[in-house]
Image (tube, rainbow, N blue to C red):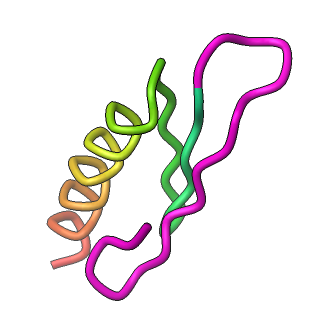
């Protein structure tokens, strides 16, 4: 999966229920892949606003 030009790595968390995603120095967690991806989109938007 991608957000713009940035790649998003989504993986299953060991010893827990749910998934995690890493992209551009951000880490998000959630119960399903779509939830993790939507949280990552929000995190990337927040971090890009801080850089401006």
Numbered range of the magenta stretch: 1-18
Left or right for 39, reference 21: left
Residue drawn at the location 31% of the way across and 71% of the way down: 3
Left or right for 28, reference 48: right
Give percent across and percent down for residue 42.
21, 48
Q: Looking at the rendering, in which quadrant would you find the N terminus?
A: bottom left
Q: Looking at the rendering, in which quadrant would you find the C terminus?
A: bottom left
Q: Where 6 falls versus 47 (above or below)?
A: below
In the picture, residue 38 is in which quadrant?
top left
Q: Nearer the viewer, residue 18 or 26?
A: 18
Residue drawn at the location 53% of the way across and 45% of the way down: 27
Residue 48 covered by magenta stretch: no
Q: Residue furthest right?
A: 15
Residue 15 covered by magenta stretch: yes
Q: Where 36 falls versus 25 (above or below)?
A: above
Give percent across and percent down for residue 13.
73, 28
Residue drawn at the location 15% of the way across and 66% of the way down: 49
Q: Where 12 falls versus 5 (above or below)?
A: above
Q: Nearer the viewer, residue 1 or 23?
A: 1
Q: Where 7 falls versus 22 (above or below)?
A: below
Left or right for 35, reference 30: left
């Amino acid at each position: 999966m991608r957000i713009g030009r940035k790649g998003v790595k989504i993986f299953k968390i060991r010893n827990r229920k749910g998934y995690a995603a890493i992209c551009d120095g951000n880490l998000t967690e959630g119960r399903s892949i779509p939830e993790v991806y939507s949280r990552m989109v929000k995190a990337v938007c927040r971090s890009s606003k801080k850089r401006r």
